[in-house]
Image (cartoon, rainbow, N blue to C red):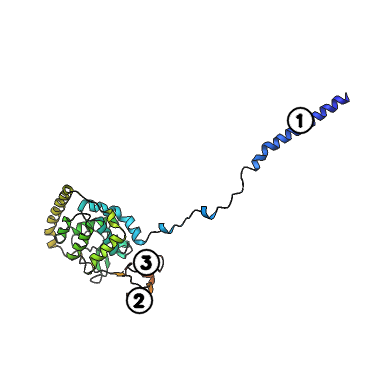
Amino acid sequence: MKQSLLVLIALSIVTSSCSLLKKEQQSAPLTQITKPAEPVKNSEKVNITNSSSIKTPAESYIERFKNIAISEMNGSGIPASITLAQGILESGNGNSRLAKEANNHFGIKCSTEWKGETILQDDDNKDDCFRVYQSPEESFRDHTEFLKRKRYAPLFELDKNDYRGWANGLKTAGYATNPRYAELLISLVERYELSRFDRIENEKDKTIREDKVMKEIALNIPTEKKQETVKKPVVMKIYEVRSGDTLISVSKQFTLSVTDLKALNGLENESLFPGQLLLISK
C-alpha cells in the first residue's frame, strides 16, 4: 500500500513538472518575438533631403503655370515657352508686387473699358493704374488677348513652336524697350528647356487657328484706335548677374535692401551665379 502511494506521488510530481515545462515552452516565444532593431547602415539610410529635388524660383514658376501656358498656346498659337519666359521676366518668377497682390504677371495696365479691381504702382508715372485679376490664370488669358492686336498680327502666322521667331518678333513690334529683350527670352527658353511645352501643328490646324485669330484681331482694330495705350513697351527692370556680383553690390547699385532683393526674387540664400536674372524693381 505504501509502495503504491509512493508511486502515485512520484507520477503526480513528474506529470506536474512536465505540465509546467510545457507552459514555459509555450509562453517563452512571447518574450522573444520582437528583437532589438539593428542600426540602419549608412548606405541604407533614406535621404530625405535630395538637393536635385529642390526647385529654383523659376522652376517652381514653370511647374505652376505650364498648363495655362499650354492651354493658351493651343487656342492662340503663342508658344507656351514664350508665355512662360515673359512671365518669368515680367513678374520676377511671380515674386513682384503686382504678381503677388494683383495676380498681374504681365504688367497690363488699366484702360477705359476695364471694369475690374485696380492697384496703383509707380511705373512710367507715379501711381500708374494696373489691373487686378482674380487669379494668375486670368492674367495669362488677358495677356493672350492683349497680343491679339494689329502690331503683333504677323507673329500669329508663325508656327506655334517657333519660339525664336516669336522672341524676335515681339522685340521688332516694340513690345519691350530693352535691345536684348529677344535674347533674354531665348536664353530663358533654352536654359529651362521651355520648348518641351511647345507643340507642332499640321498645316490644316495651323490654317484654322490663323483664320480664327486673324478675325479676332480684325474685330479689335476699331477698339484699339479708340482706346488709350493699355500697355507701353516693357522697360526691363531685370538685372543679369555678372561674375563677382553679390547681393550686397547689386542692392547698392539699385538702392534696394538685401532683404527686399531676396524677397522680390524668392531667394533662400545669398548665392548668385553669372547669367542669373534678378528683378530689381518693386
| Res 180 → quadrant | bottom left
Are the residues tagged 3 and 2 within 8 Å (C-beta)?
no
Which residue matches tag 1?
A: 15
User: Is label 3 in a helix, a strand or a loop?
Assistant: helix
Q: Nearer the viewer, mark 2 or mark 1?
A: 1
Residue closer to the observer: 266 or 180: 180
Q: Earlier in the sequence, mark 2 or mark 1?
A: 1
Q: Earlier in the sequence, mark 1 or mark 3?
A: 1
User: Is label 1 in a helix, a strand or a loop?
Assistant: helix
For the question of whether residue 164 can be seen, the reply is yes
Residue at the image point whose x is 30% and y is 58% from the top: 193
> Tag 2: Cα neighbours inside 10 Å, few (<14), some, or many (≥20)?
few
x%, y% of residue 141? Answer: 24, 55
Residue at the image point whose x is 70% and y is 37% from the top: 24
x%, y% of residue 273? Answer: 36, 68
Residue 252, numbered circle:
2
